[in-house]
Image (cartoon, rainbow, N blue to C red):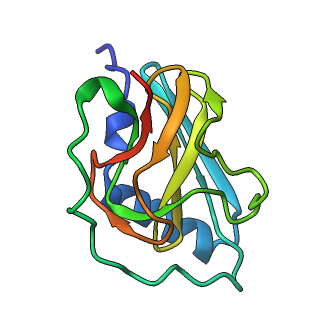
Amino acid sequence: MKRQPVSISRYSEPGTIADLAAHLERNNISAIEIETPDGSLKIVAMAGDQTPAALRPIETNKAPVKAGDILARAPMAGIFTAAHPQRPDRVVQAGQSVMKGEIVAFVTAGLVIVPVIAEKAGTVSAIVAEAGALVGYGSTLLKTET
């Protein structure tokens, strides 16, 4: 019997990611990368002395965003952070040009840090989410000029 290839979606559910992160922590492993024919996932554990950002309500009073304006969306629900905890000097800012597929921010949930990927090339016109804000899956995080 021929085996069907495993899809990356099998590993990208928040519960599965949390289980993998817990396994990494229990076994003192700093990272894991999973590659399948349709994508890849990398989970990097945070250092033990780092504390998660305070939870803030999701902001809903911002102006609506047109689909053409969206540069990046949240890949999962969690806490928005503009920079990786181990690389705070590498922050995407308004006015900066980014390439499609470039990591532009991160969303964290507990010890899980998931990169936010630019959906297209463009110039960042606004960072919609505030650092430390709770964001939902698919929430617009960065906008571009149309």
**Residue at left offset 35%, top offset 79%:** 56
**Quadrant where the N terminus is found in the figure:** top left
Query: Is residue 50 shown above or below 144?
Result: below
- Describe residue 69's horizontal placement relative to residue 30 as left or right: left
Q: Which residue is at the front of the view, 14 or 95?
A: 95
The image shows residue 50 at horizontal and vertical percentages of 66, 81
The image shows residue 106 at horizontal and vertical percentages of 53, 53
**Residue at left offset 58%, top offset 56%:** 82
The image shows residue 94 at horizontal and vertical percentages of 58, 43
- Describe residue 110's horizontal placement relative to residue 57 as left or right: right
Query: Is residue 52 shown above or below 37?
Result: below
**Residue at left offset 37%, top offset 64%:** 78
- Describe residue 88's horizontal placement relative to residue 73 as left or right: right
Q: Which residue is at the front of the view, 112 or 115?
A: 115
**Quadrant where the C terminus is found in the figure:** top left
- Describe residue 118's horizontal placement relative to residue 55 as left or right: right
